[in-house]
Amino acid sequence: MLTNLTLENLLILVPVVLIAITFHELAHGWVAYQLGDPTPKIQGRLTLNPISHLDPLGALLLLVAGFGWAKPVEVNPYYFQGDRHKGMMLVALAGPLANILIAFIGALLFSYFGSYGSYAFIFFSNLVMINIYLAAFNLLPVPPLDGSKILAGLLPKSQVNLLFSLEGYGPLILMLLIITGFTRYLVLPIAKVLITLVWGLASFLVI
């Protein structure tokens, strides 16, 4: 992440953030649509237009703090074919996986073009880091983040209701974690593992 948010750096970082949130939310919508839910398509979320996915506060946090969120895609699991809980798990998992894939592509491009100039170096390195941190943040098992829905899909159905009962407190818990700075202690270990995997695989393929 860049700590010096000059105008020059912002001109590089803003497109990176828009790429990260666009593919994150598009992946959610696309998987839901493939499972039979027309809601994302009806609401215009199956698009690469970043304005459709932008949450101003979440995007600002991505710029200054390294973690944040986009405008959530609305999903109706009653349209899903098969197990609704597993379907929601797949929809939730799609967002972080899309960010990890973009980070991997960024790492590959950095390996080829990062040494050719400061702009390429800054752009591709931040494309990796912002996507990694967006994925790691959303993997936290705190409602309404993706991690809570992934966890719900893994838990026995008898325990899912307990997790759902915490949803009303999720946003408050999340804001407390962010305000106190404790979020970093949760996000960093996940991000470090993902960074190691992404850069390691990219380096292996480049060699």
Image (tube, rainbow, N blue to C red):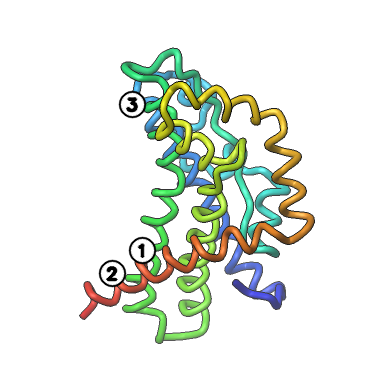
Drawn side of residue 88 relative to residue 54, left or right: left
Q: Earlier in the sequence, mark 3 or mark 1?
A: 3
Q: Nearer the viewer, mark 3 or mark 2?
A: 2
- Marks 2 and 1, how far apart at CA: 8 Å
Q: Amino acid at mark 2?
A: Leu
Residue 78: % across, % down: 45, 13
Q: Nearer the viewer, residue 154 or 71?
A: 154
Residue 73: % across, % down: 54, 32
Q: Nearer the viewer, residue 171 or 205?
A: 171
- Circle 2 — which element? helix
Question: Pointers 2 and 1 in contact (CB under 8 A)?
Answer: yes
Residue annotated with mark 1: 104
Residue 102: % across, % down: 40, 57
- Marks 3 and 1, how far apart at CA: 24 Å
Q: Residue furthest front?
A: 158
The circle drawn on residue 201 is 2
Going 57% across and 53% down the picture, which residue do you hit? 137
Q: Amino acid at mark 3?
A: Gln
Going 62% across and 43% down the picture, which residue do you hit? 54
- Marks 3 and 2, how far apart at CA: 29 Å
